[in-house]
Amino acid sequence: MQNALVVTVLSIATLFLVLTIVIVLGKGWREVRDGWRRARRRELEPRVLAYAHGSDASILSALGGGVRGRDRAVVETILLDHASRVRGIEHERLCRALDELGFVDRFLARLSGSRWWRRAEAAENLGLAGAKRATAQLAAALTDEVSEVRLRAAKALGLVGGRAAVLPLVNALTEPNRWSTIRIADILTGMGSEVVKELMDGFPKLNAHAKLAALDILGRVHSLEAVPWLLKRLDDKESDVRARAAHALGAIGVVDAAPALRKALDDADWPVRAMAAKALGRVHDVTAIPALCEALRDREWWVRANAAEALKAAGPPGVEALERMLTDADLFAKHQACLMLEDAGLLDRRVAQLAGSGPLRSSAESVVTRFVEAGQIGRLRELAATHTEAKVREALARLLPRETPPGVAR
Amino acid sequence: MGVAQRILVAEDDPVTRRFVVSLLEERGYEVLVAEDGEHAVATAASARPDLIVSDLVMPYRDGYEVLRAIRNDEKLKSTPVLILSMRDREEDIVRGFEQGADEYVVKPFNAREFVSRVRKLLEPRRA
C-alpha cells in the first residue's frame, strides 16, 4: 500500500517535471525563433522597402536573387504588414512581390485547406495582397461553412475590388441569415463608386431586405451617377423603397433632386413623406420652404419633426418661415415650429434682442408674443428669471402672462 | 549639396514608422523618430525639425496634445505639422486643422501623395 503511494507520487512528480521541461524548452525555442526572425526582419525589411519605393520590375534583385526557405515567412510578414498600410503605387508593388514570390499561390492553396483558421487567414492575406486572380475563389469562400472564413473572404473581396468582386457581395446582401447585412453594406460602401453599377443592375433580383440595404449604400457612397436611377425609385410600388430612395437622395445632397422630393412630400405613405422632408433639409433647397411649411401640418409627428428640421437647415429664410408658422391655424404646425425654434436656440437668440431697440426689438417682441399665444412659455419663464440682461428680464416680465400665486382661485 | 531638411516622425506603430522613415530617407531627408507624444514634444524642442509628421493616437500624449504643445512653443509654433492618422471622420480632420495642423493624411496612405505634401510643406513660404 505504502509502495503504491510512493510510486504514484513519484509518477506525478516525474510527469510535472517532464511537462515543465517541455514548456521551458518550447518557450525557449519560440524566443530564439522570434529573436532570429526579428534579426532577419531588420536585415530584410530595408531591402523590401527599397524595392517598394524604387522602380525595379522584380523584387528578386533587392533580395539577392531569391528568398531562402527560412526567410520566406519573414518576407511574407514584411510584405503583408506594409501592403496593409499603404495605397497607390507602393501598394501595387508590394502586392506584385507577394505574387512573384509565390505567396499568393500558397494562400490560394490554403484557402481550400481542411483547417478553418488557415482558410480564414488565407482569405485575409489574399485581400491584403490585392489578388485579383483570387476573386473567384474568394467568392466561393463566401459559402464556407465557417462564418469567420465567410466574413474574411467578404472583406478580402472588398480590398481586391473590381466588378467581379462586387457581384458576390451584392448577392450576399440577400442572405441576412448567413450574413450581417451591416458588415456587407460597410464593405460595399468602402469599395466606393465601383459598386454603383452592379447595385443598380442587380436591384430587381434582390429581395426586399437587400433592396433597402442597396439604396442605403448608394446614398453612403454619394453617387451622383445613381441620382437619376434613385429618382425613378421614388415611384416604386413599395413604400419602403420610395422612403429609402428619398433618404439616399438626401445623403447625396444634390439639389437637382429637390423637385421630385417636394412631390414625395405628398406621398400616401408617411415614411416616404418623412424621408422626403429630411432629404430636402439636406439638399438645402429654399424653394422647398412652402412645401415644408405644409408638411409641418402633417398628421404624423415624424413628418412634422423632419420638416421643422429641414426648415432650420434652410438657413435664415427657413427660420423666418418657422417664425411665421407660429401664427398658423394648425395647432400641430404651430407646436412643431415652437419646438424647433426653442431646441435650436433660436428663441434664446430672439429673446436676447429684447435688450436692443428699433425694428429688431419689435420683431423679437412679436416672436415672443406668438410663443405666449401658443402657450409655449416654459423656456420664456426660465429666461425671465435667469437672463443676465436686466432689460431682457423686464421685457419678458411685461410680455409673459402674470403667474397665478399658489392658493389663489382662478 | 545643401544641408538635408530635418523631419520628425512621431508614430507609435513600428511598421508605419519604418515605412515612413525609409520613404523620407530615400528622398534625402534627415529623419528623427519619436514613439510617443511625450518623446515627440521633447525631440521637437531639442532638435527643432523643419517639419513634424505626427500620428493622432499615441501613448502619453496624443497628436492633438502634441499639436497644442508645438503651437504654444515660441520657437516651434511656425513649424509645419502634417497629421498622419487612421481617423478619417470629418470631425477628426476638422479638429486637426483647428488645432493648427497644416496637412492631414489618412492611413492607409498613398506614399507618393504623402511625399508631395511633405515637399510642399517644406517649400519656402510664399510672400
Image (cartoon, coloured by chain):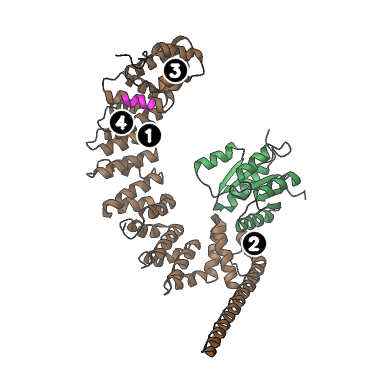
Chain colours: A brown, B green
- Describe residue A293's horizontal placement relative to residue B115 as left or right: left
Mark 2 or mark 4, earlier in chain: 2
Mark 1 or mark 3, earlier in chain: 1
- Label 1 marks a residue whose chain is A
Secondary structure of the residue carrying tag 1 is helix
Secondary structure of the residue carrying tag 3 is helix
Q: Which residue is mark 1?
A: A255
Residue A160, given in percent of the width and then of the height, sits at 45, 60
Which residue in the rendered view is the most extreme toward the top?
Answer: A358
Mark 4 Cα within 10 Å, few/some/many (few <14, many 20+)? many
Give the label on residue B115, or none: none
Q: Which residue is mark 2?
A: A50
- Share a chain, discs 2 and 4? yes
Mark 2 or mark 1, earlier in chain: 2
Report, in whole angstroms, how far the alpha carbon at label 1 lies from the one at label 3: 42 Å
- Label 3 marks a residue whose chain is A
Secondary structure of the residue carrying tag 2 is helix
User: Could you tell me if the residues under marks 3 and 4 are in contact, i.e. CB atoms within 8 Å?
Assistant: no
Please provide the residue range marked out in magenta: A335-341
Residue A55, given in percent of the width and then of the height, sits at 61, 61
Task: Indicate the quadrant containing the C terminus of chain A: top left, top right, bottom left or bottom right.
Answer: top left
User: Could you tell me if the residues under marks 1 and 4 are in contact, i.e. CB atoms within 8 Å?
Assistant: no
- Describe residue A319's horizontal placement relative to residue A107 as left or right: left
